[in-house]
Structures are given as structure tokens and as C-alpha cells.
Image (cartoon, grey):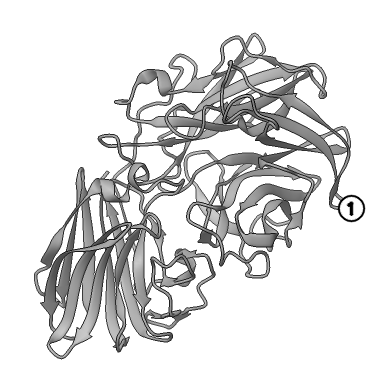
Amino acid sequence: MRPANPILTGLYPDPSICRVDGTYYLVTSTFEYLPGLPIHASDDLVSWRLVGHAIHDPGQFDFSLVPDSRGIFAPTIRHHDGTFYIACTLMDAGEVSGNFYLTATDIAGPWSPPVMLPDARGIDPSLFFHDGRVWWIGCREVVPQTFEGETEVWMRELDLERGELVGEESVIWTRTMARAVWAEAPHLYERDGWFYLVTAEGGTAFEHSVMVARSRSLAGPFLPCPRNPVLTHRHLGHGVDVQAVGHGDLVQGDGDEWWMVMLGIRPIDGHHILGRETHLAAVEWDDGWPVVNPGLGRLDAPVVQPRQSESSGAPELADFLSVRGFADFAEQTDSAIELRSTGESVSSGAVSAALLRRLTSTESAVAVSLELIDVQDATAGLLLRQSDSAQVRASAVATPDGVRLTLVRRDGVDSAIGSATLPSGPFTLSAALTGSEITVSAASGEEQPVELGRVPFSTLSTETAGGFVGTTFGPFVEGPTGAAVRFTAWSQHDRR
């Protein structure tokens, strides 16, 4: 089987996978978005369904101080003796920042409060269960460094009953290549009397790669695979369809069938807006070393089936993300969702009233239908968000003459692109992405849409905005606290 990649489109980076009783479970990073740590399940590695989130309760963490592209980093999911474990990092969230793990006996949750490990320095933790013991594996910067980005992989025993690291720690890996930077995403496995260490190197951009080493002893020394990197696309050049491939995690299927999940991006003219997406490849073993996508040595070209994803009737709160806080600013009704302003703007760096979904294609049409109900001195509309400083907004205000609409491009500062006025009443805002630009339109009732303007595709790219996330879209309201908008429908139609 050659999978149709990406298997999860849009903002699904840093994948980790395990298999329990014939079902595969996959978790990915969410950074400043909530609910966090989405968990997908599949019985065949082809069809994936969302089964829950590990960060699902305001009591687990306070995200209100989390900057763009910080928050939840690089989880690892494992299962042992009837319990699921997720090890992860919370970045730049104030006093609660650091490494932690969560547990659940049911993959759908509820998941436990986080168990913080103050002695676990660094990022990208993993767990390895072996011979009645469990080991915490992490990566961190070397102190002192001989060059910027010099990192090491370390290991220490974890006492699950006490919820703390015990015993001596050991450094088991530094890098495969001289002056290679950012060893990350370390995972340990056991096969045929060997312990295998899989890590990433090169950073999570164009130079990303997957490296493998092995040892007969868990304590090392680990010797690198002579074929390293076992997976990368950096040697294929900047014109290749999938780039920045790395951050791999292995899982065993039936018999000696193995698979690897990894992240990758799909740029257009040097810009990508969807974020890092989850891909999958078959793995075979040759002379005791993993061979990824044997016979090809790289990921297949992306195959995303045409599909239409639309709400059926009223939108459901469970289908949307919010930024830095759970959506207590939104109330579900039988026919709609009512959003009320938190008093913060969507570019303020604080918790604002926006309900968002992942953009999943660069050839896509998205839309939201809204009605202004209590918006004196307030603004509501359609938000396409890459960060607080990189956005496209179709903003609506109520005036005596009707609904005044303005298209705003935010690239550090707001710039008005175009405007129009619609009759008072419900309206629909839409954005069509086609190759190099985004066309934003507005319509009232059954009237023909009015184009508000066009914005370069690159406005919402990681290359412009920085960070680690992809574009999200959905309705928002900002202005005086309590100002409200009724959200009645949404759609996303991917043309490829």
C-alpha cells in the first residue's frame, strides 16, 4: 500500500503514532490553539477519524500568556499496560512552562491533569517502556555550545508512581553529521535485540531530515546508520512538491510490517500557508536498518482527493478551534453559534472571540454566514489567521446605510484593501484561494457576491509570518466586551 499523502492536511505537525489492538492512534502539535493535542484513529492507515483531544479542560493549563507559535510542542503518544501516555512540552506559558505527561485509560479521554517534570530540560520528549521500567528521552541545547544549534539527546528513568525522574541521566546522542543542528524528536524502539534511536536533524525547515542510530545496549553507545539520513527531501531542491520532511516516528503493524509518520510542507513559489502536515510511508528493514519508502527513498507526490467539507445546518462548537483560551465566549443554540467579544482584538495577543478551522488546501473556497445582532462600536467578520501579525480580515460594521465591509491585510500593521456596503441583515463572507492570491467577497441573501479585493497568497505564509503553524479561518467579533454576532453556517470546499 502506498498512502495518499498527506494523511492529515493542514495544521497537523510533529506527528507521533502508536498501535493498540489493531488500531493506530496519532497525535500532533497545536501550539497556541485549543482544544490541544488532537488524537486521530485509523484501522487501515487510510481513513482517519478524530477521537478526542488530550488538552480539553481549562484546568489543565493556562494558555492566556502563550505567544504565537509557542504553547504545545511535539507530543509523543505511547500505550503500556492498558494506559495511554502523551509526553509533551509547553513553551512560554509563564510559570507552568516545561515538560509534562498526561495519561488516559480511554483514548477519547478524559485525560489526566498534566504531570510536570521540572528536571526535564529541553523539548520534544518521548517515552520508552522496557523490562518493567520506563525511560524519559528528550533533547536540549548543549551547554556550553561550540556552535549555534548544537544539541544532545538525553535519557533518564521516570518513576510513574511518584511522577518524577529518578536515577542518573545519560547523554545518548549528539548528532550524525559534523556541526549538524537541532537534534529533535527522539524516539526509542526495540527490534531483534537492537535498540534503535530515531531523531530529526537540520531544524524543522528546508534542511529537515530523519536520522537513525542503534545499540545493543539501552545505555549505548549508539552507532549511526551508514545510510543516514534515512529520509530527507533537502537534496531534491527547492522545486520539489513536498519539502521540510522530518520528525519521524515508527510504528509496527502486523508481523514485520512497519510504518513511519513524519511532517512535510507543500510550498507554492517558495511559500507555504497550510503549515506542516502529517505524511506516512512504508518501512522495510534491510541489514538491520530501516528503509523508508523502499524503491523510491522519498515520499510519493501528494495525492489529495477532491472533497467538499460543509456544515450540515448549524455549526457545532466542537468543530472549531480558539486561540489561547477555550471558547467560553461562544454559546451554542439550535440554529447557530453566538459569539460575544472578549474585549480584545484578534491581533492583540490576548484571548479574542474567534472560532477557527484549519485551512486544508491551497485551492480552496471557504465561507462563513453571519448576522450582526449586538455590535454597537464593534466589528465582526471572516478571519484568515497565520498569527497575530499576519492575517486577512473581511470586517463588517453596522451603519445606518447597511453593513459596511472592509477587507484588511495585516502584515505587522493593518492595510485596507477594498470595501463595499450591503443591505442590513444576514450576509456571507467568502475567500477563494487560487495559486498565488486570495480573493475575498461578500454577499447578502441571494444576491451575487461583491468582490472586496485580492491579497497575495504569501501574506499568510510561514516564510512571511515566521512561526510553526498553518492558516486557520472562521468568524470573529471584536470591540466592546459582550458585542455579539450570530454565526449560522460555514463551508470549506477544497478543489484538490
Residue drawn at x 23%, y 68% is: 429
Name the kind of residue labelled 1 in the image: Arg
Residue drawn at x 14%, y 60% is: 453
Up-down relation of residue 195 to residue 153 (above or below): above
Up-down relation of residue 26 to residue 394 (above or below): above
Q: Where the C terminus falls, by quadrant? A: top left
SS assignment at label 1: loop
Say whether residue 311 is visible: no
Residue drawn at x 19%, y 48% is: 437
Quick check: 9 left or right of 496? right
Q: Nearer the viewer, residue 185 or 85?
A: 185
Q: Nearer the viewer, residue 248 or 22?
A: 248
Q: Position of residue 430 (x, y in %)?
A: 22, 64
Q: What residue is disc 1 on?
A: 162
Quarter where residue 384 is shown: bottom left
Say whether residue 244 is visible: yes
Q: Position of residue 88 (x, y in %)?
A: 66, 48
Quick check: 471 left or right of 172? left
Residue drawn at x 34%, y 35% is: 303
